[in-house]
Image (tube, helix red, strand yellow):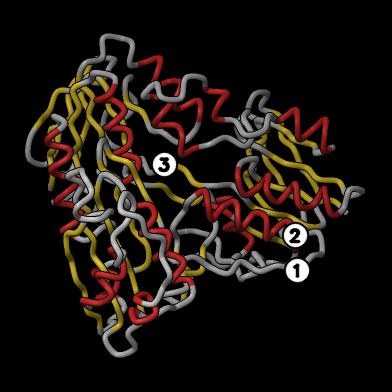
Amino acid sequence: MNVVIIGGDAAGMSAAMQVVRAQPDWKVTVLEKGAIYSYAQCGLPYYIGGIVKERDDLIARAREVFQEEHGIDARIYHEVQDVDGENQIVKGIVTDSGEPFEVAYDKLLIASGASPVFPSFDGSELEGIHVLKTIPDAEKIVTDMQEDVLNVTVVGGGYIGLEVAENFVEQGKKVRIIDLSERLGTVYDEEISEFIQKEAEAKGIELVLGESVKSFEGDQRVELIQTDQGEYRADMVIVAIGVKPNSDFVKNTGMHLHETGAIVVNPYMETSVKNIYAAGDCATQYHRLKEKNDYIPLGTHANKQGRVAGSNIAGNTKTFKGMVGTSIVKFFDLTIGKTGLGENEAKELEIDYEVIGFETAPHASYYPGDNPLFMRMIKHKQTDQLLGVQAVGKSGVDKRIDVAATALYHRMTTEDMENLDISYAPPYNSTWDPLQQGARRL
């Protein structure tokens, strides 16, 4: 049996390991567009900030490990350009030589990931303009920012934009964030965004909100950013306005695609084309609360989906149980977390909901330390089912978000939340956990 996998990162290699362990006699070929396997994309901002000292610390397993210890044909610089689903052949080009290649498969997994969104701005070819998705991207940024770079502009106020902005500030740069939206962190409700904005301003970040980038200007290197409302000087620009699934090469197959361009998969990670699976940032994820396919590309989903896909390819039936939209981000002294639906999502789904926002503390009120925790909780008005939780504070956010994510997965009500047996000691909690405080008020 010939198994071909497109993509050598989280989903692809999680799948590959499932296949070689279950079917050691099968041939597994991985076609990786770049030269690095199994690296931690989420750690890249911290490499830029110097918190992660060595780039190799971000690599979970080297390509040689997959080849020598597990017998995987792990190829590099193999860019797939077409999939012939009828004849079961993958076609592409070896980018460092320009030579074409073809590989036949019995089972194919597409784990091609996603690429940064980069609109065709005038002047986008100038030096000093970067995206951040791969280790080579991060290395270019680290090298470039040594070149008398003082002023850095980050285009985009989402997860990556916030993390990158923080790490440039920690490197002593003057940082500006430009975002088309009127607020930072639009995946969160407005009250949460207000905390993010205050933290950014307190750390000296210049915020330019509600403006759209039109062009970059300069001689050879970027010097100026032109928006629809003004112009701003910059020595370096990081464009972080989202990602798009790498799925263009499957369009000739007639494969079903999501509105985002992600490949639609069923719980077994099967696509609509026979013998082709998909997983990770190029594929959809089933949202347990929305009860439909969604696109929230995260490393946690990629690893789970890759494992499920590999198991099914190898003949061991497993299903991806879905996700509830859980995420967390550090931004200077704040931790911001979200799980489930926000208020805007509930409105879009036409859910009859109730929501509450309140300030509390992650520990007993009498225990020393001024450490407020702000939370928003939303529930279904008729069924009492918990629908979502958002939190922001200096500590205690991760615990509440993870407990809430577990509750959402199991469709618990706010009354169920009140009855949870949650750990308590004054340094860590009050007798009623903040989640339970909110549940009692809703």
Question: Is residue 119 visible to the viewer in this orientation of the structure?
Answer: no
Q: CA distance from mark 2 to mark 1?
A: 6 Å
Q: Amino acid at mark 2?
A: Ser
Q: Amino acid at mark 3?
A: Pro
Residue 437 lies left or right of residue 314; in this view the side is: left
Identity of the residue drawn at 75% across and 35% down: 74
Left or right: where does residue 170 sit relative to residue 34?
left
Residue 308 visible, this angle: yes
Identify the residue under disc 2.
Answer: 311
Closer to the camera in the image, 84 or 143: 143
Query: What residue would you read off at disc 3?
Result: 116
Q: Residue furthest right?
A: 25
Quote the CA–CA distance across marks 3 and 2. 29 Å
The local secondary structure at tag 3 comes to strand
- Sequence order check, earlier mark of 2 and 1: 2
Classify 10 Å Cα crowding around label 2: few (below 14), some (14-19), many (20 and above): many
Q: Position of residue 153 (x, y in %)?
A: 22, 29
- Label placed on residue 103: none
Marks 3 and 2: CB-CB under 8 Å? no
User: Secondary structure under badge 2?
Assistant: helix
Mark 3 or 2, closer to the camera:
2
